[in-house]
């Protein structure tokens, strides 16, 4: 997946827009910070979320972390591969390790997401570079 086509949150979720829907996952930075993922709890399809709501939980060898909804909308499909293979989040965070899709309810929220360049700058700021 081309990272330049993704949008990002400061909470380290990524979004790939597909019309009025979005595919959502966590970034490579986030999966490195979590360590080995051992379980992923995904939202139920059809669940309504507001931007910033907890949407999923990822359990790793280090901790359990919430994943926040990057946009307001309705959960479409969840990634069925993660039930048997949660390590896909580590192995392919921008591919088969995606978490879910959602139908976007408030398109103007997309403007608040970071493009790849701004997200990289944000990461350099975290690292103190």
Image: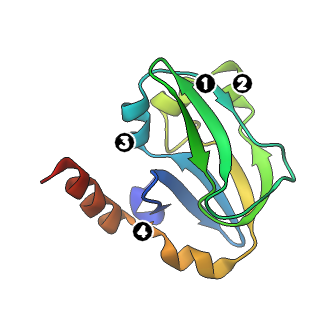
Q: Is residue 125 found left or right of 94 in the rendered image? A: left
Residue at the (49%, 35%) spot, across then down: 92
Say which residue label 4 marks: 114
Q: Residues within 10 Å of mark 2 (few under 14, many from 20)?
A: some
**How packed is label 1: few (under 14 Cα within 10 Å), some, or many (20 or more)?**
many
From the viewer's perspective, is residue 115 above or below residue 1?
Answer: below
Residue tagged by mark 3? 29
Q: Residue drawn at (50%, 75%), measured in percent from left and top?
A: 112
Identify which residue, 55 or 14, lies in the foreground.
Answer: 55
Q: How many marks?
A: 4
Front-lying residue, 10 or 5? 10
Judge from the rendering whether residue 48 lies leftward or rightward of residue 89; answer left or right: right
- Residue 11 drawn at (x, y percent): 46, 53
Please tell me the numbered disc located at residue 83.
2
Q: Could you give the CA–CA distance between mark 3 and mark 1, rounded to whole angstroms?
A: 17 Å
Q: Disc 1 marks which residue?
A: 86
- The numbered mark, 3 or 1, whose residue comes first in the sequence reads 3
SS class, disc 1? loop
Q: Looking at the image, do the residues carrying marks 3 and 1 touch, with CB atoms under 8 Å apart? A: no
Rendered view: 67 above or below 19? above
> Does the CB distance between marks 2 and 1 fall below 8 Å?
yes
Mark 4 or mark 1: whose residue is earlier in sequence? 1
Circle number at residue 94: none
The residue at the far right in this view is 46
Calculate the distance from the C-alpha at mark 2 to the C-alpha at mark 4.
29 Å
Q: Give the residue drawn at x 32%, y 68%.
A: 118
Q: Secondary structure at mark 3?
A: helix
Q: How far is mark 2 from mark 1, CA to CA? A: 6 Å
Q: Residue 103, how many percent across, how many down?
A: 76, 64
Label 4 environment density (alpha carbons within 10 Å; few <14, some 14–19, many ≥20): some
């Amino acid at each position: 997946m081309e990272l330049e086509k993704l949008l990002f949150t400061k909470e380290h979720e990524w979004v790939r827009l597909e019309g009025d829907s979005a595919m959502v996952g966590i970034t490579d930075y986030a999966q490195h910070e979590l360590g080995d993922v051992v379980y992923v709890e995904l939202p139920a399809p059809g669940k309504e979320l507001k931007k910033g709501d907890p949407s999923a939980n990822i359990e790793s060898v280090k901790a359990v972390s919430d994943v926040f909804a990057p946009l307001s909308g309705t959960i479409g499909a969840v990634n069925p591969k993660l039930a048997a293979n949660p390590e896909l989040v580590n192995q392919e965070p921008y591919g088969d390790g995606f978490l879910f899709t959602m139908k976007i309810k408030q398109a103007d929220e997309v403007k608040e997401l970071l493009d790849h360049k701004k997200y990289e700058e944000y990461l350099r700021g975290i690292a103190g570079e």
